[in-house]
Image (cartoon, grey):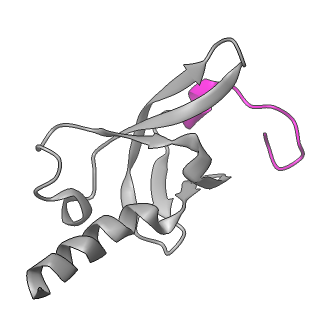
Amino acid sequence: MDADGSPQEITTLVGREVYSNNGVFVGEVEDVRLALDAETVTGLALTELNGELFSGRIEPGKGVMVPYRWVRAVGDVILVNDVVERLKDDEQEEAIA
């Protein structure tokens, strides 16, 4: 939905940058996963991933699928919950232990 409540074309999501709600770049939307029967978006396929967040977890050149329920806001960029940043925090904790 647009700021005025009108629906947007799904294709407008493709190419948008995705950031965590803490302002950390996550990746760029390459594709959208749909539930056709419910006519809803269920996930965002991201590429051009933040190397710091996904280093050692995702092979270079690969992408990730982010559940759409993590999306907090859609505007010029897409904001998602900080769950993605926890990947980095988990990695740091393992290094300390």
Residue 8 located within the stretch drawn in magenta: yes
How far from the left and from the top, in percent, is residue 29? 43, 39
Q: Is residue 85 above or below residue 40?
A: below
Task: Tell me the quadrant of the picture where the C terminus can be found.
Answer: bottom left
Horizontal arrangement in the rendering, residue 89 relative to residue 79 (left or right): left
Q: Quadrant of the N terminus?
A: top right
Asked if residue 8 is positioned above or below residue 82 in the image, the reply reads above
Per the rendered image, the range of residues in magenta is: 1-13
- Residue visible at 26% across and 72% down in the picture: 90
Q: Is residue 38 above or below residue 87?
A: above
Which x, y percent locates residue 21? 54, 69
Residue at the image position 88 percent from the left and 42 percent from the top: 5
**Image position of 87 (left or right of 94):** right
Q: Which quadrant of the figure has residue 8?
A: top right
Residue 68 on the magenta segment: no
Viewer-side residue, 22 vs 86: 86
Residue 34 coordinates in the image, percent (x, y): 57, 22
Q: Main secondary structure of the magenta part?
A: loop
Q: Hey, which quadrant is residue 51 in on the image? A: bottom left
Give the mark count.
0
